[in-house]
Image: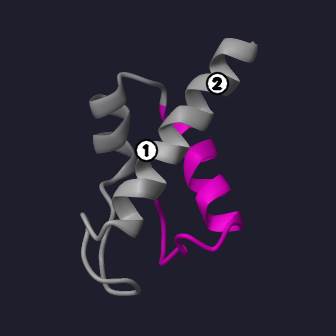
Amino acid sequence: MSENITLIEQRTTELRNEIVAGVYGKAGKGRIPSTADLSKRWRTPRSSVYQILQLLQSEGVIRAKGKY
C-alpha cells in the first residue's frame, strides 16, 4: 500500500509542476487533461487519478469546474 501512496505523490508532483509551468495554459484559464487521459498516460486506475486531483484541489492548485 505504501508503494501506491508513493506513486500518487509522484504523479501529484508531476502534474503540479506541469500546471505551475503553464503546460496547460494560463492560471485560471487552462484545462488539464481528463481523468481518462491521465489514467491512460500513467497506466493507473481512475481512482488514483481522482485522488491526485483531489490533492491538487485541496492545495488550491486546481479548482473543479463541473466534473473531472
In the picture, which quadrant includes the N terminus? top right
Residue type at mark 2? Answer: Thr
For mark 1, does the 10 Å Cα neighbourhood hold few (<14), some (14 to 19), or many (20 or more) residues? few
Residue in the image at 46% along x and 59% along y: 68
Residue in the image at 47% along x and 56% along y: 16
Query: Which SS class for mark 1?
Result: helix
Toward the viewer: 39 or 24? 24
Q: Bounds of the magenta span?
A: 46-68
Residue matched to label 1: 14
Residue in the image at 35% along x and 28% along y: 42
Residue matched to label 2: 6
Residue type at mark 1? Answer: Glu
On screen, residue 7 above or below 30: above
Residue in the image at 59% along x and 33% along y: 8
Q: Looking at the picture, how far across and down is residue 13, in whole percent? A: 52, 46
Toward the viewer: 35 or 9? 9
